[in-house]
Amino acid sequence: MLDVEKIRNDFPILSRKVNGKPLVYLDNAATSQTPKQVIDAIVEYYSNYNSNIHRGVHTLSQEATDAYERSRENLQKHFNAKHSHEIIFTSGTTHSINLVANGFIPFLTNEDEILVSEMEHHSNIVPWQMLCEKTGAKLKVIPMTEDGELDLNSYTNLLSSNTELVFVNHISNTLGTINPIEEIIEKAHKNSAAVLIDGAQACPHVVPDVQSLDVDFYVTSAHKMCGPTGIGMLYGKEEWLKKLPPYQGGGEMIEEVTFEKSTYADLPHKFEAGTPNICGGIAFGAAIDYMNSIGFENIAAYENEILIYASQELRKIDGLRIYGTAKHKTSVISFNLEGIHPYDVGTILDKMGIAVRTGHHCTQPIMDYYNIPGTVRASFSFYNTKQEVDLLVNAVKKAKRMLS
Ligand code: 7TS
């Protein structure tokens, strides 16, 4: 099991105070905190070998290139991709999804259909709507149930020979639902549809094996898994990445340029135009090393304990409703107090040093489903403790007394 006190010492920010109270950081689904092992990798890069990559003969450039490419291989191993060139560095999940959506413009017509689930983050909805506007393809919605699970019967019925693409998140950022992506992928493939899985919320908790999932595209952001912001990943099967056109043109993504015509570089460089986030890429690898040193099985078991304890204690509060009660869920709890706006609860919690997110969490269709303006969302990581759950529960009780 985890030595949480020891782990907490790795995170300098966890010892700071907010509004005179020790910080209780429960906004991990928005972004995770950064351990000193990752901060050290960033400091070392800028202190010792900051340089542009893939272009210099000098030592610093070579060192930076090696570290960046080693990090790509690290990601390849972690996600079990067949080739390291199937790992494309992007600025994050949003960039990865837009890259794929743009790539499908030449392949879709107004006969085609795209399926997206009702519980997606806006970044896994809006790029597909933009793709539909450009191609005439139709966007269809896989509905969810009251518990916050996907309605798989409806999904099966929606699939047809016109379905070209399916987009679903691995874990919902608002409800915590772990979706049955194996089944979703298998059914899509039986209908010859390609699948993109949004793994932004999954990668801090589980290790997706992209080959055994047989997924076509898998995307994530480093900042949700102890890495820095501004760096993320697109995994794509080689055959797809070869087929899709580049997203952006510029330096490093070309083979040859004349004014008549340019030809594109091989993978992965075809999709990495311009100077990338070199330090971020290296730190992403360091974050994966850090999480693996703790162990994802340990992380999942511990976070599940926290989830069960927090759900049980919060449910004891009269008038508190939890949204998202799927059988398989991760350590995200969205809730409301009857008759009280979530923003007001969040503001009072902040006064007590407790960081939660309030609002629609970039999932307005989920809010429409429940007919609510937003929720309070507490999202837990492996460095949170049961004592912090108690502080949250007491603070919510206090907020209720103050606001009722
Ligand atoms: N997909 C999911 C499932 C997410 O949770 C998020 C971010 C994104 C995509 C976008 O990731 P980005 O790194 O490109 O911004 N989710 C949240 C959240 O729940 N609170 O703040 C950001």
Image (cartoon, rainbow, N blue to C red):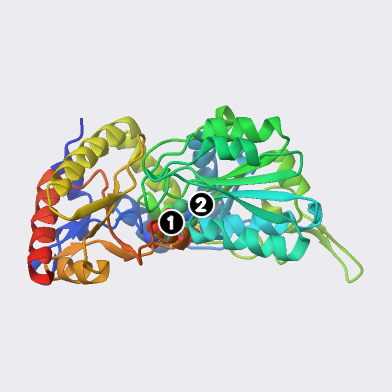
Density class for disc 2 (Cα within 10 Å; few <14, some 14-19, many ≥20) is many
Q: Quadrant of the N terminus?
A: top left
Describe the element under mark 1 as helix, strand or loop: helix
Please report the residue visible at 35 percent of the width from the left and 58 percent of the height from the top. 31
Comparing 336 with 203, the one in front is 336
Q: Is residue 47 left or right of residue 100?
A: left
Circle on res. 75: none
Q: Is residue 70 left or right of residue 297?
A: right
Q: Are marks 2 and 1 in contact (CB under 8 Å)?
A: yes
Residue 227 in view in this figure: no
Q: Is residue 174 left or right of residue 84?
A: left
**On screen, residue 300 above or below 202:** above
User: Residue flagged by tag 1: what amino acid is it?
Assistant: Tyr
User: Residue flagged by tag 2: what amino acid is it?
Assistant: Glu
Q: Earlier in the sequence, mark 2 or mark 1?
A: 2
**On screen, residue 25 above or below 234:** below
Q: Is residue 150 left or right of residue 224?
A: right
Circle on res. 118: 2
- Picture quadrant of ligand 1: bottom left
Q: In terms of image quadrants, where is residue 397?
A: bottom left
Density class for disc 1 (Cα within 10 Å; few <14, some 14-19, many ≥20) is some
Which residue does the numbered mark 1 point to in the structure image?
Answer: 369
Residue 264 in view in this figure: yes
Give percent across and percent down for residue 392. Answer: 14, 55
